[in-house]
Image (tube, rainbow, N blue to C red):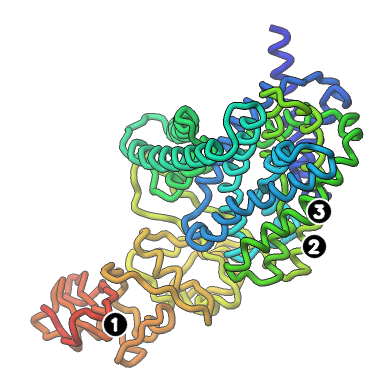
Amino acid sequence: MFLVDTLILLTGLLLLLGIASSKFSARLGVPVLVLFLAVGMLAGSEGIGGIDFEDYRLAHAIGTVSLALILFDGGLRTPLDSIRVAWKPSLVLATVGVLITAGITGAAAAWMLKLSLLEGLLLGSIVGSTDAAAVFATLRYGGGHLSKRLSATLEVESGANDPMAIFMTVGCIQVLTGQTEVGFGVVRLLVTQMVVGAIVGLGMGKLAVWLINRVNLDAAGLYPVLASAFGLLAFGVAAWGNGSGFLAVYLAGIVMGNSRLIFQRGIFVFHDAMAWFAQILMFIVLGLLSFPSRLINVTGEGLLVSAALILLARPAAVFLTMIPFRFSLRELAFLSWVGLKGAVPVTLATFPLLFHVQGAAELFDIVFFVVVISVLIQGWSMPLLARWLGVNQPLPPEAPVTLELSSLRHVNGDIVDYTIDSKSRAAGRLVRELALPEGVVIAMITRGEQIIPPHGNTQIDAGDHVIVVLRPETRPLLNNVFAHRGDELKSLPAELEFPLRANVTVGELEAFYGIAMSAPEETTLGHLLRERLPAKAIKVGASIRCGPIRLSVRGLDDVGAIERVGMLILRPNDEPENDAKP
């Protein structure tokens, strides 16, 4: 029992040290992953902690579960917008790019370290994937963030390239140990891994959404646990069917994260905490596995492999695969440098040890050395390089307060925080001039450390945070209201009627939504309907066509005045201009 108590005590202390180290990483400019590893190394048998730990099987199990939880959280937080913007370059970089990176690194390692080509390819496969989470954390510490397309490419690549690196590592090990043959056997393994992983991940994600939204759990805390169960189930079922469990858990997370779930905010917060816990635990355990004396012995080999990977393999993979997607030279240069290594390579380096591959211990030490060099050199220089290349943008100011909408039942509403800058269409306008849809409420405006209760005459200034309560279907309208001046307005979906207040003017529709109408700018929508409809026809459902839209009466007050108006975007081939419909 004393051993168990001691183990619990040590785990708590190591977690506290890991969390404390994250506070120093921002000030020191050191990526947090390095400090997590350092905590584990200091606690190890050759450090001040003196903990003797060399159980690679346990480390592999902890690493696998941790990676599954991290990928599941990554999938939950990957918006469909990012996938739509960058799925093509991300997919190519995550597959062909990893293959090129592993091939060049493996060939260089085989030549420099006197290995067989297959052994070199195994080393290249292990270090082939990137850790974009480390990229974004490092950039945040440097005070900036990337453009939408560049960040989306890295974000999606990070989740999609881990399964490819894992597949290549497993494939090389199976060939080295005689479990499969080169050629058709490897191709069959790839197809099985990807197809089974994709089918299970998408199917399990949809099943999870269906069940979570229909099961009636008494305790709110069980909903995040139920979501975790489906993520782990996706991994296990895919692995049982010889598919990629990592691909399955990532896709299941994407499906669930982009669906409306009961207690969704709680599910996100829970898995964010689980991902941090898994990351800290995994890196500390991997740090415990390392021996500084052995790392010193592989310094030469590690530096050679690091140079081949950072200066040759990653740039070649980026330029060969990304040029067709019209990235600028500056963006390509940045993508080439940010092949930051993280948890996956060190965890994959335990695979050869488990399968008793010849030279596996030295291979683990080289991989560990390469990861440390990558995170230190690339991590430290990344914010400076982003500023020098001009690919970063200032971070938007953080809101001093936040509101959350949590419920154990479906609530048809969202709370959205819009950040106002000097280019926003809403900057300098009064609240009553915003042409807000019916049912949309500005709940709060924060300015610096002040909370400003919004009224019709409240002016919105640059730097404000406008917190809006809305129904999901009105989101496209609100996005245009708070968009930048000069930016192309997002087209509104046809056949979806948007609710508007009757006092919205024609000029406001033009200014905020880009809808041109043949009527004076100061005319309100209610007045326009009264002008064009016969007096007896003014009732709920009556409508008129005005250029590209159809306006309908959706609400009358007690005296018969129009209160609410429905706006329907018409297709070009809809009925001709025929004015009023009763």
Amino acid bearing label 1: Pro
Residue 206 vs residue 37: left or right? left
Amino acid bearing label 2: Leu
User: CB under 8 Å between callouts 1 and 3?
Assistant: no
In this rendering, the count of numbered labels is 3
Disc nearest the viewer among 1 and 3: 3
Q: Position of residue 109 (x, y in %)?
A: 79, 43
- Front-most of 430 and 559? 430
Disc nearest the viewer among 1 and 2: 2
| SS assignment at label 2 | helix
Residue 351 vs residue 240: left or right? right
User: CB under 8 Å between callouts 3 and 2?
Assistant: no
Amino acid bearing label 3: Trp
Q: Quadrant of the N terminus?
A: top right
182 lies above or below 500:
above
Q: Which residue is mark 1?
A: 548
Closer to the N terminus: mark 1 or mark 3?
A: 3
Q: Which residue is mark 2?
A: 384
Q: Position of residue 252 (x, y in %)?
A: 45, 41
- Front-most of 555 and 193? 193
- Front-most of 83 and 495? 83
The residue sitting at 67% across, 48% down in the picture is 130
Q: CA distance from mark 3 to mark 2?
A: 8 Å
**The label number, if any, that marks residue 380 in the structure image:** 3
